[in-house]
Image (tube, rainbow, N blue to C red):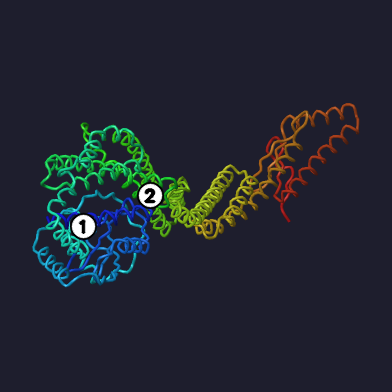
């Protein structure tokens, strides 16, 4: 009876502290309280899931007020309060206080309290009500940890055990008083124990909750609904544990508690999924700044999906899990697609970097037009790979920085390629002009040859001095200049010859061709035609018959005019002149002075 009474009062204190936290602390429904006594010192451990916002000072104040309102019969006692995240081995905050002692205790009561502690230290651990923890990420904590408090709390059982050993002095005092009263009043204690001789309301409430569980699950739409159902199950489990082993309902209460515990575990799975999904959805409202943020959202959606996939078809939570699974998988698929795009852009950045290295190497050894074409093409590939990367991509910043570095290189390579291309074209034009000039020379088209030599010379001088063709162009200039001079001289001579031939042809022409001619480097040779000579003889015979001196004068004048014309042509051509009659006899000869 003493142990049972002590355990009841310990649970009562735990329940009171729990209710204080729920009433006075935001999100207090997520806090779980454990009480124990270690080395005659009351120790209170308050746990909460990760992600719950914690005002450490407020938590300690609420617990201290709760202890003060329930400590009317205490002797002076030191209390240690700890805060810990569910699943952590050590607490992150500690607070100590001393309850004021009461002068109403007799020496006998103090001795009984001391004796009770000795008995308790050798006894088995007392069971602590289980309250399934809901997974969060802690975003606020106190920094007032101490090595001593960590060492003390680390000796307490873990969450999986859900047990604490020991009782505080207040509870022990109540236990001793309970023994005295029960000895005095006989079976009065039995009458106050739940489910012994009274109706078992705790069992009825828990059974009703267990029976309506499926209906309540069907109404769940959010994690808040899950949390409320979880709290109801936790409270029912606490009440079931208050049913003593002597109760005729003890066996049934244990089975019911086991059933509720299994339901609580499934609720925990779904709640974990809801919580992860909520965080992922909140983060998904903004576009990720980097790849790590996107990967974090992928991880959260997977954490939301995995617990729901373990809910089998026989579970009341299965329809809810399947409904959420469809939504979460669609969200995960969206994130996966974003990751694929990000991977695509990141690969483009990596590829562009590799291409830029190749471009730099080619640029260092480029000499020919083909070399500079390859350099320009390589830089263009690097830049074009980066341009499509969108501004919302995490690779955008690196891409823009690389573009600002690569574009000047691309422009320089393009200019150098253009320069080499123009130099190549200009040099080729000069070479083509030389080829034409030489062809015209062979055809004695000296004026055309002069024009092409002039073009070759001026074009060769236009070749850029820093191009690969500048040396070739320089080698072309001197020969082209000499050839131009020679062509000009020959063009002058040839032009004179052409004019002389034209004059000779005009002089020798008429109704009766007067003469024929040959012109070469030795001079001009003219031969009177037989027809013209016969015409002259006929004119002289006619003049003799008719005794007409005018006819003779006309013949002489015509011969004199022909001679003067031939002399002028010889003077203009600056070459000797020989005139033959039709029989081949020299009738006139002129030499150079």
Give the tally of numbered discs: 2
Q: How far separated are the C-alphas under marks 2 and 1? A: 60 Å
Q: Which residue is mark 2?
A: 346
52 w.r.t. 538: above or below: below
Regarding residue 213, the answer to whether it shows in the image is yes
Q: Residues within 10 Å of mark 1 (few under 14, many from 20)?
A: many
Task: Please state if 520 lies on the left or on the right of 247 as rendered.
Answer: right
Q: Is 461 in front, or is 226?
A: 226
Label placed on residue 457: none
Give residue 412's position: percent from left, percent from top.
51, 56
- Where disc 1 sits, the SS reads helix
Regarding residue 381, the answer to whether it shows in the image is no
Q: Residue at x 34, y 49 (%)?
A: 295
Q: Is 238 in front, or is 173?
A: 173
Where on the picture, by quarter, is residue 211? top left
Q: Quadrant of the C terminus?
A: bottom right
Q: Earlier in the sequence, mark 2 or mark 1?
A: 1
| Badge 2 vs badge 1, beta-carbon distance below 8 Å | no
Q: Quadrant of the N terminus?
A: bottom left
Q: Is 118 in front, or is 495?
A: 118
Give residue 521's position: percent from left, percent from top.
63, 48
Q: Which residue is mark 1?
A: 10
Q: Residue at x 12, y 53 (%)?
A: 186
Q: Residues within 10 Å of mark 2 (few under 14, many from 20)?
A: many
- Where disc 2 sits, the SS reads helix
Residue at far front of view: 185
Q: Residue at x 32, y 61 (%)?
A: 69
Front label number (2 vs 1): 1
Q: Is 236 in front, or is 332?
A: 236
Give residue 109's position: percent from left, percent from top.
16, 68
Task: Please state if 366 lies on the left or on the right of 8 as rendered.
Answer: right
Give residue 401's position: percent from left, percent from top.
47, 56
């Amino acid at each position: 009876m003493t142990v049972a009474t002590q355990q009841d009062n310990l649970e009562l204190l735990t329940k009171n502290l729990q209710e204080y936290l729920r009433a006075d602390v935001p999100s207090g429904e997520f806090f779980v309280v454990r009480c124990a006594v270690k080395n005659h010192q009351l120790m209170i451990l308050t746990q909460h899931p990760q992600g719950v916002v914690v005002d450490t000072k407020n938590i300690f104040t609420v617990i201290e007020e709760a202890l003060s309102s329930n400590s009317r019969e205490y002797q002076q006692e030191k209390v240690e309060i700890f805060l810990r995240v569910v699943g952590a081995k050590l607490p992150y905050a500690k607070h100590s206080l001393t309850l004021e002692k009461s002068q109403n205790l007799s020496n006998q009561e103090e001795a009984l309290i001391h004796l009770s502690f000795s008995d308790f230290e050798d006894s088995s651990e007392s069971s602590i009500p289980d309250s399934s923890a809901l997974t969060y990420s802690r975003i606020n904590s106190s920094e007032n940890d101490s090595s001593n408090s960590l060492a003390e709390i680390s000796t307490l059982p873990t969450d999986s055990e859900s047990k604490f050993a020991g009782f505080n002095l207040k509870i022990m005092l109540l236990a001793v008083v309970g023994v005295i009263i029960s000895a005095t009043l006989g079976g009065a204690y039995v009458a106050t124990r739940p489910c012994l001789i009274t109706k078992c309301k705790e069992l009825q409430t828990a059974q009703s909750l267990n029976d309506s569980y499926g209906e309540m699950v069907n109404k769940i739409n959010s994690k808040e609904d899950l949390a409320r159902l979880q709290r109801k199950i936790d409270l029912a489990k606490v009440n079931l544990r208050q049913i003593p082993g002597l109760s005729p309902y003890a066996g049934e209460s244990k089975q019911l508690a086991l059933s509720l515990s299994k339901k609580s575990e499934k609720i925990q799975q779904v709640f974990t999924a809801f919580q992860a999904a909520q965080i992922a959805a909140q983060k998904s409202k903004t576009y990720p700044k980097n790849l790590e943020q996107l990967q974090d959202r992928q991880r959260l959606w997977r954490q939301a999906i995995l617990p729901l996939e373990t809910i089998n078809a026989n579970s009341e939570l299965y329809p809810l899990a399947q409904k959420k699974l469809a939504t979460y998988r669609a969200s995960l698929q969206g994130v996966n697609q974003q990751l694929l795009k990000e991977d695509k852009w990141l690969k483009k950045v990596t590829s562009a970097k590799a291409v830029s290295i190749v471009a730099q190497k080619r640029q260092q050894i480029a000499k020919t037009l083909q070399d500079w074409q390859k350099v320009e093409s390589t830089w263009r590939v690097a830049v074009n790979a980066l341009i499509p990367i969108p501004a919302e991509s995490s690779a955008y910043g690196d891409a823009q920085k690389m573009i600002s570095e690569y574009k000047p290189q691309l422009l320089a390579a393009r200019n150098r390629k253009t320069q080499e291309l123009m130099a190549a074209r200009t040099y080729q034009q000069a070479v083509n002009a030389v080829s034409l000039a030489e062809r015209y020379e062979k055809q004695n088209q000296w004026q055309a040859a002069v024009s092409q030599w002039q073009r070759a010379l001026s074009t060769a001088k236009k070749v850029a001095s820093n191009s690969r063709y500048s040396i070739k162009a320089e080698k072309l200039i001197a020969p082209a200049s000499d050839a131009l001079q020679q062509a000009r001289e020959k063009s002058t001579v040839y032009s004179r010859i052409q004019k002389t031939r034209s004059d000779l042809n005009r002089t020798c022409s008429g109704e009766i061709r007067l003469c024929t001619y040959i012109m070469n480097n030795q001079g001009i040779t003219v031969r009177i035609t037989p027809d013209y000579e016969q015409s002259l003889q006929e004119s002289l015979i006619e003049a003799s018959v008719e005794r007409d001196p005018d006819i003779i004068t006309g013949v002489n004048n015509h011969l004199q005019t022909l001679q003067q014309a031939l002399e002028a042509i010889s003077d203009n051509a600056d070459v000797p002149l020989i005139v033959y009659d039709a029989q081949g006899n020299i009738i006139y000869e002129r030499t150079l002075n």
